[in-house]
Image (cartoon, rainbow, N blue to C red):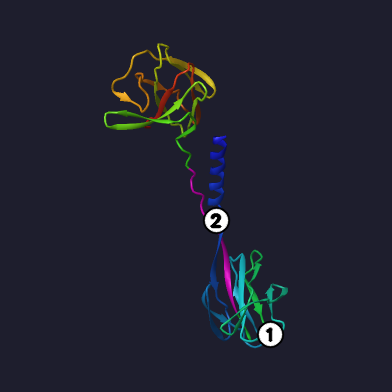
Amino acid sequence: MKRYIILLLIVLLASAALAATVRTKVMSFDNPGNRRLLKTDAGNYYYYRSLPEKSMTLNTAGVEKIQLRSFGIEAIRKPQVTIIIGENRTTYDLKLKERLNGFYLYEPLEFEIPANTPKIEVLCYNRSIYLRSFQLITVVPKPKPVTIPNRVINAHAGMIDIMHNSTTSDYYTFNAVQPLKFTLNNSRNAVVYVRARLTDRSLPSFSLYHNGVKVESHEFSLKRTTKYSAPGVKNLTVGIKLNLPVNSGSGEYELRADTDHLFMARPVLLKK
């Protein structure tokens, strides 16, 4: 279940990294008429109106999509603008968005530019309307490499501190009910240091599994350590060092208790 969650997070991160963004680039008319400055939260730009009974031309070589912004200096009953692409003429109604500083701001128009279109014309007969064009550029960021953790602990019975001199190390516990499960990724290898709590004269034993297959079993002696200690553990065995099977990519490892003892393990990654 935890591996599924990790994979899901990786997919979501990758999807977020690939999410496209759109930025605008100001375009200039080749033959504009008068201009007016409009200051808004989106920026301060000069807007242009065409010369009487003339259209304004835009160079659209390499342009895929355009946004046309506009405003009127007076209330207009039916504001319209016509876009001429080759032999095709399309007339758009301008919808009032808001009033700002006495101007009538209209909703932006967005339209696709057919491939290999060198220029288009913008025609507006009403000279109370000012226009500005922007190229819409879709930016797809390069995907960031997703780093998979070298070691993932999937299951354990709790954590415990084991002290040696003035240093403390984190160990994961496992028992007859709950094994210790972990994954090694990125072809990383590791060793595991294991200790057990002695409760009587019985010998603690456990087994190592790799990708669901039993590899080996180990049995502790009754010898107690005098150099290591753990909170609440009176009789701690000497340690066993496990050299894990070689990991060629991603491997599942599991330590299962064969006896009714508390075991403590610490997987440590080996340097490459």
Residue lying at the far left of the rendered structure = 165
Question: Nearest the camera: 29 or 180?
Answer: 180
Q: Is residue 162 above or below residue 117?
A: above
Question: Nearest the camera: 233 or 94?
Answer: 233
Residue lying at the far top of the rendered structure = 201
Magenta stretch in the rendered image? 131-146
Could you tell me residue 209's position as x and y percent?
Answer: 50, 21
Q: Amino acid at mark 2?
A: Val
Could you tell me residue 220's position as x and y percent?
Answer: 39, 15
Could you tell me residue 178's position as x and y percent?
Answer: 51, 25
Quadrant occupied by the N terminus = top right
Q: Can residue 144 be found in the magenta stretch?
A: yes
The reply to whether the C-beta atoms of the residues labelled 1 and 2 are less than 8 Å apart is no
Q: Which residue is mark 2?
A: 140
Could you tell me residue 28's position as x and y percent?
Answer: 55, 76
Question: Nearest the camera: 12 or 266?
Answer: 266
Q: Residue 107 falls in which quadrant of the image?
A: bottom right
Label 1 packing within 10 angstroms: few (<14), some (14-19), many (20+): some
Q: Residue 4 falls in which quadrant of the image?
A: top right
Q: Which residue is mark 1?
A: 76
Mark 1 and mark 2: span between their CA atoms?
A: 40 Å
Q: Residue 244 falls in which quadrant of the image?
A: top left
Mark closer to the chain start, 1 or 2: 1
Q: Is residue 188 above or below residue 28?
A: above
Q: Can residue 145 be found in the magenta stretch?
A: yes
Q: Amino acid at mark 1?
A: Ile
Residue lying at the far bottom of the rendered structure = 52
